[in-house]
Image (cartoon, rainbow, N blue to C red):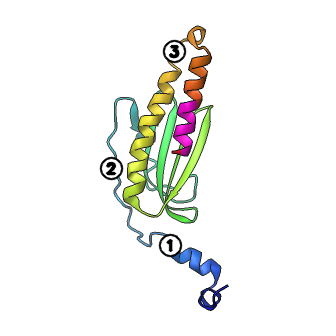
Amino acid sequence: MPANLKKIGVKKLIAKIFRKSTSEKLIDVEIELSEDWTKFENGNSIGKKGSEGGKILNDQENINGARITIEANGGNAPFVITFGIYGLMFHTEFFSEIEIAVEYFKRKKIEIDYVLQMFEIPENNQDKEWENKKDEYLEKLVYE
């Protein structure tokens, strides 16, 4: 291990790289609501502690069964996004910059909409192709 790393210490180095936002002021993260998206609990969750231990900056719920949340200072990162489709999946991503986190938030809302639209197809019309497409959308949702 290089001498300068020994002086700083690995934990301190990681903390320096992934420093948390030191601002106590709540960052205004206004992300437009779309047709099926509403403010979770009418916006009452904003400023409260989120699932990753940070302060919730924006919290939206899809009326068809999904939720996406952005937190500041959650986990070991300045910004955290969690999202899930009720009864199907849950995912968490970590970010060092708010701008990148907000763009990710917007993109994931669109991708969640695609997955939810898949479930509007009646069960008797869900074939092997439907199953493959659903899996493709879910994989894209989590890994891209």
Give me the disc on residue 126.
none
For the magenta stretch, what is the residue range?
A: 136-143
**Helix or strand or loop: what does disc 3 sit on?**
loop
7 lies above or below 104: below
Q: Secondary structure at mark 2?
A: loop
User: Which residue was labeled with disc 3?
Assistant: 121
Q: Look at 58% across and 52% down and name the residue there.
A: 51
Quickly name the residue at label 1: 19
Disc 1 versus disc 2: nearer the observer: 1
Image location of residue 138, percent across then percent down: 56, 34
Give the quadrant of the N terminus: bottom right
Q: Amino acid at mark 1?
A: Arg
Residue at 55% across / 45% down in the picture?
143
Distance from Cα at disc 1 to Cα at disc 3: 45 Å
Q: Nearer the viewer, residue 64 or 41?
A: 64
Residue 43 can be seen, yes or no: no
Q: Residues within 10 Å of mark 2 (few under 14, many from 20)?
A: few
Label 1: element kind? loop
Give how far apart the Cα atoms at labels 1 and 2 are: 23 Å
Tag nearer the camera, 2 or 3: 3
Q: What residue is rendered at 34% in x and 38% in y?
A: 33
138 in magenta:
yes
Which mark, by number, is residue 30?
2
